[in-house]
Amino acid sequence: MRLNPFDPSNIRVGSGGGGGFPGGAGGGVGCGAIVIALIGALVFGIDPGTTLGTIDAVQQGTGGGGQVEQLGDAQSVQQICGANEYATEACNALDSLNRTWQPLFQQANIPFQQPMLQFYSGGVRSGCGSASASSGPFYCPADHGIYIDTSFYEVMERQLGARGDFARYYVMAHEYGHHVQNMTGLADQIRSAQAQNPRAANQLQVRMELQADCYAGVWAGRNRNLIEPGDMEEGMNAAAAIGDDRLTGGRVSAENFTHGTSQQRMEWLNRGLQTADEDQCDTFADLRR
């Protein structure tokens, strides 16, 4: 995808939260992450039993993240976004995502705040508590932060077979989709529904994740002029690679899925791509019938 170079004045980046955990390791981060915590069991050797059932921990956590650079702090943004190729890609994507979504909120007369992008290595303390690299990229609604350990992209390519720049852009766009949900108030509604009906918590979380996939597709669809041959295939392959059924290999029952099957993730990403219409991303429609 031929994204334009980022404009430092149009993105917010975090300046803290590098490696390690202040005060020790932690990590119940699950909700808002593009991959379920079970990827830790498959890639990093973590027991999935310690992370299943904590899907709203990231939303309820406390603590402080890194300091946030204000808009216009061009020198700091350039330094952070220029740290490596992956960081530059992520900042290019964030700039494009801001330019795509912010006008839609303005048109709908809904208040909007740009998310903060925080790179980290190994572990980080966000506004939602501590997380490790095994959590994968995640979004924290408490501080409006998108958190990425860029080494995850190597895991995607080498161990999950999700290759190409569009696969990485899909990661950013998915996490941004959670920010959209936060800004519209949907995330609060779902948290409330999960608290009232814990047995339905996983099913509701799946719908949240599939909607974020669809929103990622909407972003790409609204920037179709920048899409290159092979991009859509890279996106579909990435969505398939991180489906719950693929990641768990049948070790976890469907009712415990938190992100959706490979087929579901491909279908909703493709819906967003083809329609470029956020109104087509209502994964909760059947619940209101």
Image: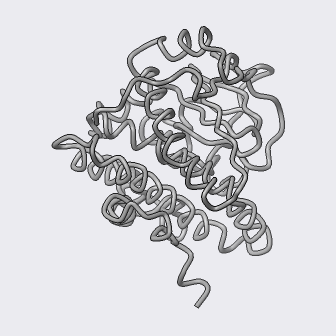
Give the position of the N terminus as an image quadrant.
top left
Farthest residue to the bottom: give it. 289
Seen in the image, is 136 located left or right of residue 222? right
Rendering coords of residue 32 (x, y %): 60, 49
128 w.r.t. 254: above or below? above
**Residue at the location (63% across, 57% down)?**
181
**Residue at the location (40% across, 44% down)?**
170
Given residues 120 and 289, the one toward you in this image is 289
Given residues 266 and 133, the one toward you in this image is 266
Given residues 281 and 240, the one toward you in this image is 281
Give the position of the C terminus as an image quadrant.
bottom right
Rendering coords of residue 218 (x, y %): 42, 56
Rendering coords of residue 152 (x, y %): 44, 30
**Residue at the location (54% across, 45% down)?**
175
**Residue at the location (44% across, 41% down)?**
171
Seen in the image, is 28 located left or right of residue 137? right
6 w.r.t. 255: above or below? above
Seen in the image, is 266 located left or right of residue 51? left
